[in-house]
Amino acid sequence: MNAIALILAAGRGSRMRSSLIKVLHPLLGIPMVMWPVRQARLAGLQACLVVGHQEDKVRSALADEGLMFARQETPRGTGHAVLSSLDQLPAEGLLLVCCGDTPLLRAETFTKLIDAHQNNLATVLTAKIDQPASYGRIVRDDSGRVLRIVEAAEATEQERAIKEINTGAYVFDIAWLREQLPSFLPHPPKNEIYLTDAIERAAFVGRAGAVVIDDFDDCRGVNDRWALAQAASILHQRTLRERALSGVGFEDPSSNSIDVDVKISPNTFIERGAILRGATQIAEGSRVGAYSVLENAVIGAQVTINAHSHLSGAIVEDRVTVGPFARLREGAILKEKSKIGNFVEIKKSTMGVGAKAGHLSYIGDSSVGEGVNIGAGTITCNYDGFQKHKTTIGEGAFIGSNTSLVAPVDIGAGAIIGAGSTITRSVSRNAIGVERSEQRNIEAAAERFRDKRKV
């Protein structure tokens, strides 16, 4: 049957106390509203977003998602939001409506709601909770048939005692809803049009239904930052469980933070406190060390990322070792079997197959050939105060400790650079480059030096 999901995302969300519209607040690396969008798609539904506040930001953030958009000019309630979208919707079929701030709803819940709709005109998703608070209540007759939804502010004392609440998710017959919505009367004091009135109209002709959700957590809305943090925790547990069951090992999953779009292959292991963000990918057999941070990094197979390393936009090929305490910045490419040790920083540079930089070095805007060994304390001086310059190191070269390579400079294949040198000119293939002033030893000078400074 023709079905479409309409996701309400026009509200400001003032309780977030943020300059950013609520539905764009990130949740495991994607905007909150993308969670119901993705679940609707998993349920086989095309998605349409109702936008209003910060419309341009919402459209821009979701521009690559292939969504339809409808515009609610003025926020006048949920019924008005759906009314504003009718021109974007098909003439007939089923319409699933949910809120953009309900990221915990699952595709199987949408499917269950649609399956239960059958010949109804309107079907609502409900839940039973001990403290209904400000949720709308589901009023049923003595036979258990749904009669209407009453908002908490309009409910009688008897109605407020009802434990079954409206979750804000519905399925409607689109053609019927088109006929009914224009005649809905606004509710005082805000003069808002309530979508909930559709349930009472469908019940009047005996064609309203309800599906009670088993787990109230699935339909919790996000209204403030604390609720956002709670939703993140629930979603994180769900996704971590899925990853673990697919073959990813965790030392302490409660200490990790892993965005939903991170791809981790089986037979990998994630140590305590590791943070994986964005579009990071980790191939089979790799290990991410404790308290490391990977952002949009591509990690090959059998890679070891040792503790406290930070990789952002880096590409790491198979069987590479990184860290501990290494930093790989945007444009860093580590070829197979290369090794980056502690306190080494790589930026916009390629380390060739088997190349090594063991410790305390900065390599920027460089091309480092196969089998190169870079000694401790080596720096590529790539910036002259105005622009960046490139350093090229040929395969098999040996760079001694505490060397400064002042770019632009080329070090030939097989060349050796003596420790402590400042290299400002290119060194040819298999040559030795040394730059040092002559050492002088002045006998007994240390004692005289100290005597002068005694009080």
Image (cartoon, helix red, strand yellow):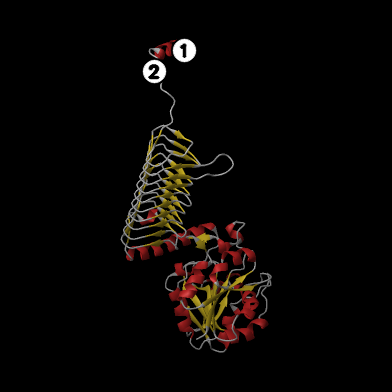
**Within the image, what quadrant is residue 62 found in?**
bottom right
Specify the label residue 45 is tagged with.
Answer: none
Residue at the image position 49 percent from the left and 80 percent from the top: 210
Residue at the image position 51 percent from the left and 57 percent from the top: 226
Q: Position of residue 252 (x, y in %)?
A: 34, 54
* Closer to viewer: mark 1 or mark 2: 2
Specify the label residue 441 is tagged with.
Answer: 2
First of labels 1, 2 by sequence position? 2
Q: Nearer the viewer, residue 154 or 168?
A: 168
The secondary element bearing badge 1 is classed as loop
Q: Nearer the viewer, residue 71 or 335?
A: 335
Q: Nearer the viewer, residue 187 or 422?
A: 422
Estimate how packed mark 2 is, as few (under 14), some (14 to 19) or many (20 or more) residues with alpha carbons within 10 Å: few
Q: Is residue 2 above or below residue 303?
A: below
Residue at the image position 50 percent from the left and 45 percent from the top: 390
> In the picture provided, is 404 more to the left or to the right than 48?
left
**Within the image, what quadrant is residue 326 found in?**
top left
Specify the label residue 453 is tagged with.
Answer: 1
Estimate how packed mark 1 is, as few (under 14), some (14 to 19) or many (20 or more) residues with alpha carbons within 10 Å: few
Count of all numbered marks drawn on residues in the image: 2
Amino acid under disc 2: Asn
Residue at the image position 58 percent from the left and 39 percent from the top: 385
The secondary element bearing badge 2 is classed as loop
Q: Is residue 127 above or below residue 310?
A: below
Amino acid under disc 1: Arg
Q: Position of residue 178 (x, y in %)?
A: 62, 84
